[in-house]
Amino acid sequence: MPITILPGVIYRIQSVDYGTYLERRNDDSLVMRPDKPDSISQRWFLRPSADGSVFKVESADTDQRGFMKAASISKVSKGEVGELAFGPSDSAPDQWALIQVDKDSISPICYLLLQPAGNRDILLDLTEPDKLILSRDPAHRNKFFHGEENLQWRIVEASPSNLPETTGDPIYRIRTLNGDGIHVEKNQLSIINQSRGDHREWQIVSKGNGKCTIYNQHNKSYLNAVENSDGHWVVIFSQTANNAEWDIKKNSDFTYTISIERILRTPKHQHTQPFALTLKEKSARVILKPAKEAHNQMWLIELSDATLGPVDEPDTDADHILPNLATGEYLVKNAANSHYIRFKANTAVGTGASQFMGGSLTSKTRLKLSKVGDKGASLSCNVQGIIGNLGIKNGQVVNESMTLTIENGPIAGQYYITDGNGNAIADNNTDNLVVNQKGAGS
């Protein structure tokens, strides 16, 4: 999908090569550091130019406003290494173009190309884990763009909604923990009639910072909330998305909380707080209540065609690994921590073998699931011309062509990837995938 930068949304800038994030230190130096999801020093605004073609990279820290700047353009123009600096908000900030590497990628990757006059081939570069520099591209890759991963970056939202990934229309179903889909019933939200077809289909579009609009496909209106004459907030449907942005937060498991900020009034004061979609079980209606940790405020969100499973829909006569799992291309995400399996293709001599890795919420690789024999399976990929084959050998995750076993997990849509002897691939919250007994973090 193309890179879309939304106004007012806070982003983080991640190195594709090392998985680290751009961080401003207290001494105004710029460094690369591991993931600190709650740190304001790793959060940035991308301020567009008038025509939206280039951006200023501005710190989201309201106490220390400033911009990412090039400190030594003259050095780079001579072919030497250039430096980065953090400039105050009253200085003239540099501008950067985001040149996308792969427009078909679910998680877009780009080059950050410096845009001062007369210098069109200066790129943000991470040559070593903490060596953030500017380098001139003698091949003028801004015309061809086949650069190495040290020149490649991900622009990721700091507070994404974490909806299920899709490369097509963002059409979803919202279900209770019992599997009943929310639909429109007499202009109210309900779970009474489960044969409602497109009444149950919702277009959920991210607006950044974890906020989304929720649009019903059947009555062509947005989910919204207004205050009634009794002072209670109620769900309504509106023709416009004005003031209709919902916070969709993923809980620690596979569920979501869907809430909207509104004013709570009491006899003595008033304050803003989230009101969450809440199942009123006796009437089977969905209403608004102050958000709290409660099972009737937890929802399942799935793609409307979630039964198909793969990122690319397989042929109707494709082989099935399991009755509910067809061959095809998939993103493989750990159910416990939402980290993806990714393949790091080492192309340079002396950098070590290519390998499968974990430990990332954003870096991911499409894996081709194929059938091997009657009951076996294989998972493979092709990254930068290097073939990866996911395998388990001697208690380790390896890059080697092997026959795997795919088994159903504890709930629908979850699976174990094993060697057939109960040893399953798991993610231990680091870059390294591990092998555990089935169920232990797998």
Image: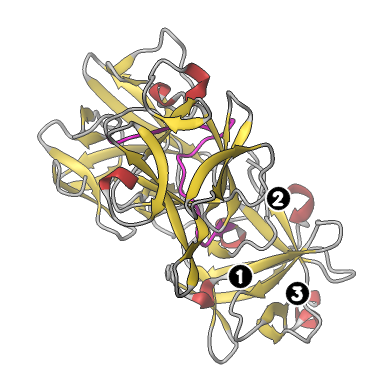
In the image, 409 versus 305, the foreground residue is 305
Question: Which one is in front in this view, the residue at disc 3 or the one at disc 2?
Answer: 2
**Mark toward the start of the polypeptide (2 vs 1):** 1
Q: Position of residue 338 (x, y in %)?
A: 35, 49
**Mark toward the start of the polypeptide (3 vs 2):** 3
Residue assigned mark 1: 44
The reply to whether the C-beta atoms of the residues labelled 1 and 3 are less than 8 Å apart is no
Give the spatial CA distance, label 2 vs label 1. Answer: 25 Å
Q: Is residue 120 above or below residue 289?
A: below
- Asked if the stretch drawn in magenta spans residue 3, the answer is no
- Residue at position x 34%, y 58% in the image: 431
Q: Which residues are magenta?
A: 154-177
Direction right: furthest residue:
118
Whether residue 267 is visible here, answered yes or no, is yes
Q: Residues within 10 Å of mark 3 (few under 14, many from 20)?
A: few
- Which SS class for mark 2? loop
Q: Does residue 152 appear to the left or right of 289 in the view shown?
A: right
Q: Amino acid at mark 1?
A: Trp
Whether residue 303 is visible here, answered yes or no, is no
Dot label at residue 145: 2
- Which SS class for mark 3? loop
**Mark toward the start of the polypeptide (1 vs 3):** 1
